[in-house]
Image (cartoon, helix red, strand yellow):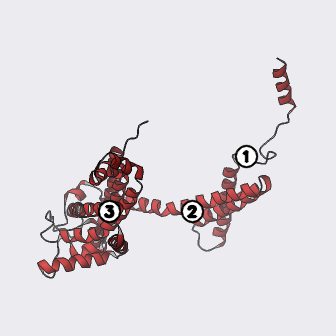
């Protein structure tokens, strides 16, 4: 009873201390400073608007000035109350947050622009018709969507086995000059321009089919040159993350090396490999230059990769925007909708890859 009374008397005798006297800014201080900085910046630009001939309000300028005022104000306030160390921490936090917002702005801007402009032709007709005999309004991109899916599927069939097997060789078997040479060539292929891949595929198929060849499989070959290095590099890094203890435990049990790779190494790293493959597909699905050279373009449906030119979504977007007919608005609308569909396809591939990676990821129990 006496101890409880003493604690109560001590709490009553202790004076009330706020955040400022405790050497710390209140929790609401950053938001208050930010709001005040934006208001001051807005008033400044409002006065500038009234004093100039241009009556348009500069919203980006007001936001940038408000952010600068906030950074200076929060640093000075923290320096006076919390000390130099905490002030530097708040300033760096502000700069990092500002950098993140600046990096995010282009992505948000592109997404909003593509969705708003592409919604005009996002209808059943766009997904059920081709551009055969269409010179104005109407038509669709079914032939381009089909061509993109077929060429991307063929590219994946070519690139994924080659890339994963190459990565397995480099990590598990590769030693000496051969391994170094393969690594060097993969690095070189990673940086080649996409149009060079298209020229290579064109030159290769011209040997067998003659000059002027335009085939969908040629587009798959060209895109494979761009996709294989990405698959090799991503798969190689994932395989290196597998602990050597797992391999050694398998070898100690008498399991041969090829079976250890198949049953231990690959299942452990499969989630990361699938993610890398998805990034590689997203890397090549939007390429235009190599497909213009070797796959060509057509206004009709073509389901055969080995017979005639084949339209793809990137080429469809390019031709619709570059070769506008009498009704230019209809061509531009189809181009924006084609870009929106391409983005949605890439998003769907990422979601599917995440689902597959979650399903096949190794389950660790306690």
- Name the image quarter holding residue 233: bottom left
Q: Identify the residue shown where x is 37% and y is 47%.
A: 249
Give left or right: position of 354 versus 292.
right
Quick one: which residue is furthest to the bottom in this view? Answer: 211
Work out which quarter of the rendered image holds the N terminus and state it: top right
Image x and y of residue 179, in percent: 34, 69
- Taking 195 as reference, is 20 above or below it? above
- Taking 20 as reference, is 13 above or below it? above
Under circle 2, the secondary element is: helix
- Taking 253 as reference, is 338 above or below it? below
Q: Identify the residue shown where x is 79% and y is 45%.
A: 22
Q: Which mark is residue 26?
A: 1
Residue nearest the observer in this picture, 149 or 111: 149
Q: Which mark is residue 99?
A: 2
Q: CA distance from mark 2 to mark 3?
A: 43 Å
- Taking 270 as reference, is 233 above or below it? below
Residue nearest the observer in this picture, 144 or 282: 282
Mark 3 or mark 1: name the one nearer the start of the chain: 1
Which residue is the site of mark 3?
Answer: 173
Image x and y of residue 284, in percent: 31, 66
Give left or right: position of 214 versus 43.
left
Mark 2: few/some/many CA within 10 Å (<14, 14-19, 20+): few
């Amino acid at each position: 009873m006496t101890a409880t009374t003493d604690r109560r008397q001590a709490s009553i005798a202790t004076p009330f201390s706020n955040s400022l006297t405790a050497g710390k800014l209140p929790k609401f201080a950053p938001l208050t400073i930010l709001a005040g900085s934006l208001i001051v910046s807005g008033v400044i630009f409002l006065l500038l608007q009234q004093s100039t001939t241009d009556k348009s309000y500069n919203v980006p300028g007001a936001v940038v000035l408000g952010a600068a005022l906030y950074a200076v104000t929060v640093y000075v306030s923290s320096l006076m109350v919390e000390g130099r160390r905490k002030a530097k921490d708040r300033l760096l936090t502000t700069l990092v947050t500002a950098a993140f917002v600046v990096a995010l702005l282009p992505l948000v801007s592109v997404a909003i622009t593509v969705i708003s402009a592409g919604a005009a032709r996002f209808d059943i007709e766009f997904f059920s018709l081709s551009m055969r005999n269409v010179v104005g309004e109407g038509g669709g991109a079914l032939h381009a969507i089909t061509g993109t899916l077929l060429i991307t599927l063929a590219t994946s069939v070519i690139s994924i086995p080659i890339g994963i097997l190459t990565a397995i060789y480099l990590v598990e078997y590769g030693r000496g000059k051969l391994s170094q040479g393969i690594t060097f060539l993969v690095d070189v292929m990673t940086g080649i321009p996409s149009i060079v891949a298209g020229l290579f595929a064109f030159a290769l198929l011209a040997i067998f089919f003659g000059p002027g060849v335009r085939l969908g499989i040629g587009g798959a070959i060209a895109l494979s040159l761009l996709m294989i290095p990405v698959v090799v590099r991503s798969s190689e890094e994932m395989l290196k993350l597998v602990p050597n203890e797992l391999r050694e435990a398998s070898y100690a049990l008498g399991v041969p090396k090829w079976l250890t790779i198949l049953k231990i190494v690959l299942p452990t790293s499969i989630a990361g490999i699938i993610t890398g493959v998805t990034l590689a597909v997203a890397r090549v699905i939007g390429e235009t230059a190599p497909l213009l050279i070797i796959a060509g373009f057509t206004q009709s449906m073509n389901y055969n990769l080995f017979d005639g030119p084949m339209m793809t979504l990137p080429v469809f977007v390019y031709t619709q925007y570059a070769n506008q007919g009498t009704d230019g608005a209809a061509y531009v609308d189809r181009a924006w909708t084609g870009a929106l569909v391409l983005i949605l396809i890439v998003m769907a591939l990422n979601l599917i890859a995440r689902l597959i990676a979650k399903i096949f990821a190794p389950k660790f129990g306690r």
